[in-house]
Amino acid sequence: CPKSGAARLAAAAAGTVLATALLRGPAAFVPTSADNHALRGLTRTSVGSAVVEPLLQASSSAMGPMGASMPAAGVAAAVGCIGAGAVGLAAGRRTPTNQRAAKANAVACRAGDVIETFLLKGPVTESNLNMKCSPLAWHMDLTGIVFFSLGVKPELIAAVAGGGLGLHGVCPVYIADCYGIVGWDDASKSNVELMEKGCGQEFGKVGGAGGEGVVVVAFRGDGHKPTTPDGSGGLAGAGLHMLVTGGDVPAPSTAGAIYGGVAKGCYKLEHSGDLVRVQQFAVSSPGAVVTSFEGDATEAATAALAKAGAKPAAAGYFPCFCRGINKYGKDGVEPEAFAAAGLDGTRLFGMFAQGEFGPPQGEPMACQVDGAKPMEVSKGSMISVLSLYSK
């Protein structure tokens, strides 16, 4: 364990931050980037990982906008544990057995390669987006965050992600400016579609009903690999790549299947805090089952779920913007069909696209990182693409 004065100060700072957070509760405390930095610094040590990580996981729910405040006894215990961890760092005494135990505890606390996602319906402000996203800042295993935005300026999202939350200092942050979005609404406990007002009328359709919102997707675990490729390449080797472009030619895959679509524009929040426009972005993952379909959504979801073998917690969904309300006359038809097929409770994330990427229509494709081969990008029209992520 570190014995330096800097390490002891870092431990003390982390203890102060978490104690303040737990004592104040959700209404009065929003972590700053400096607060998050202090906590993450402590978790990079073996004792810090063992002591702080479980508390952060607990505080995510305790301090989230939908959570209740932590009982006083829990606060006292948490502060006591932080104090003990700080003392342990200061003393610098660890037997090999204790070091191994601390490391084992840290590994056991990791959530693995998981996806957290939710929809924030408009009107979206810096305040309510910050509050909704604040629990994400406590996770130590973030590898990439994607914001699918409808009617919300990328600059507002960047101000939240790169301001008090400091997410851009932890992992790549991408923003897609969309024609429409699909995501899980906590209030209704269902997947909701929102499409830009009039979108599709240029093709003789009824047009979107309008709306505003942001779908937030947090990829956690080392299995997810975020990149900003271009038409010549740059994708990581993986089982599946979620790829979003701003109209450019999608990157080719050297290993693994591609799904996604074309948005109005793509952005990346740089580590410096600058918001820059990019040609495209991707998040590559170890495995999933992906299907492209034009026909019955229930049949497509049933076949994909049968191949997946288990209901996933999250699924990517990229329909053409000429589907949804423009095909069925109302919103939510395909998400409801997915639920009827056995995906009830599975959180969808994605966007309505002006051109969709996915495998050829037909049998669902099982994608795994082991033995993944190069695959051509198939760009469809008037189709939907559904990806069930492996747990």
Image: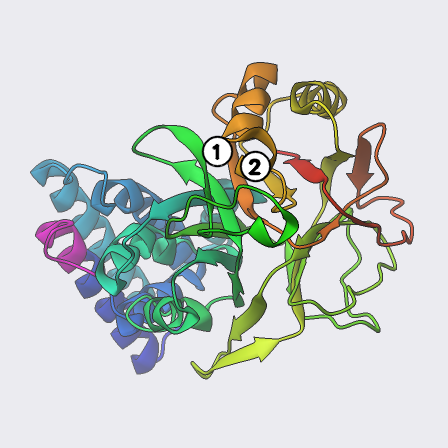
Front-most of residues 61 and 17: 61
Q: Earlier in the sequence, mark 1 or mark 2?
A: 2
> What amino acid does circle 2 point to?
Gly
Residue at 62% in and 38% down:
323
Residue 241 in sight from this viewpoint: no
Q: Which residues are magenta?
A: 19-30
Q: Secondary structure at mark 2?
A: loop
Front-most of residues 190 and 54: 190
Quarter of the view holding residue 277:
bottom right
Q: Is residue 23 magenta?
A: yes
Front-most of residues 35 and 121: 121
Q: Is residue 48 above or below residue 280?
A: above
Q: Is residue 34 above or below residue 69?
A: below
Do the residues under discs 1 and 2 have CB atoms within 8 angstroms?
yes
Spot occupied by residue 306 in the image (x, y as percentages of width and height): 73, 18
Classify 10 Å Cα crowding around label 1: few (below 14), some (14-19), many (20 and above).
Answer: some
Q: Is residue 47 above or below residue 358?
A: below
Classify 10 Å Cα crowding around label 2: few (below 14), some (14-19), many (20 and above).
Answer: many
Q: Secondary structure at mark 1?
A: loop
Q: CA distance from mark 1 to mark 2?
A: 6 Å
Q: Find disc 2 in the rendering and name its residue.
A: 324
Q: Which mark is residue 331?
A: 1
Spot occupied by residue 343 in the image (x, y as percentages of width and height): 56, 22
In this picture, residue 331 sits left or right of residue 299: left
Q: Quadrant of the C terminus?
A: top right
Quarter of the view holding residue 125:
bottom left
> What amino acid does circle 1 point to?
Asp
In this picture, residue 335 sits left or right of residue 241: left
